[in-house]
Amino acid sequence: MDFISRGFRGRPREQAPAGRLPPGQYMVRDFPVLSAGPTPHTPLSRWTFSITGEIDEPRQWTWEQFRALPTETITKDIHCVTKWSKFDTVWEGVSVDTLLDGVDTTAEYVLAFSDGGYTTNIPLQDLTEGKAWVAFAFGGEPLEPEHGGPARLLVPHLYFWKSAKWVRGLRLMSENSPGFWETYGYHDYGDPWREQRYSGD
Ligand SMILES: Nc1nc2c(c(=O)[nH]1)N[C@H]1C(S)=C(S)[C@@H](COP(=O)(O)O)O[C@H]1N2
Ligand SMILES: [Mo]
């Protein structure tokens, strides 16, 4: 009977290690896919990554140039606003510090933009000093298109909607400008530890 009622209710949720789960979150072992639209499939031959906006000389890399940049392996917990958290996700990517190396800017805000039109806004200081990457591999394999391949932004200290899939560039801005979910009432900043899910939280 115990077996039947367990099956009926679904698998019980696993206990997360103390102190690692932000308020209101639960732990998952799988990797859910959350996309607001269809998965774009930009061929690598037409893929570029750009830094635009408040910058003297805009920067752009082809896929080959981007993949020739120094890379880092990153192991982080990720937290989705729909309440799942996944621990110890392993990524490979280029640090945003590397992409911004030598850039002199007065900008304080960034709008990340993606294939398909998705955008998300992040303060510039939340992308620098080892806090954000443009990731092209997950779990030692090329990043799957559903999870944002060929490359996605990875900003693990903020809710995962800030980690723009299919990212194609960063626009440096002196004024804050809300992105896709932020315009629909999600929190402007999105700190999981302060449970900043929606505007006003
Ligand atoms: N381009 C794009 N990036 C996106 C999204 C999206 O819809 N489009 N969804 C965001 C949300 S709400 C989450 S939780 C994560 C989900 O990433 P995953 O599908 O790899 O789990 O991607 C974020 N980045
Ligand atoms: Mo999300």
Image (spheres, helix red, strand yellow):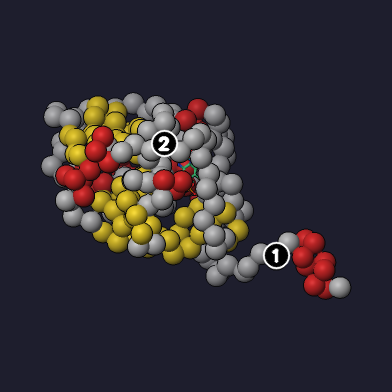
Image coordinates of residue 179 in percent, x first then y, are 43, 30
Q: Secondary structure at mark 2?
A: loop
Is ligand 1 within 8 Å of the beta carbon of the residue shown at mark 1? Answer: no
* Mark sitting on residue 40: 2
Name the residue at the bottom extreme.
Answer: 2
Q: Badge 2, how many Cα within 10 Å: few under 14, some, many 20+?
A: some
Image coordinates of residue 139 in percent, x first then y, are 39, 62
Residue positioned 45% across, 38% down in the render: 39
Tag 1 near tag 2, CB within 8 Å: no
Residue positioned 62% across, 69% down in the render: 15
> In the shown orientation, is residue 186 left or right of residue 178?
right
Q: Amino acid at mark 1?
A: Arg
Asked whether residue 96 appears in the rendered view, the answer is: yes
Q: Badge 1, how many Cα within 10 Å: few under 14, some, many 20+?
A: few
Q: Earlier in the sequence, mark 1 or mark 2?
A: 1
Depth order, front residue of 172/138: 138
Quadrant location of the C terminus in the rendered image: top right
* Mark sitting on residue 11: 1
Relative height, residue 133 to residue 52 (above, below): below
Report how many numbered discs are placed on residues in the image: 2
Residue positioned 19% across, 45% down in the render: 64
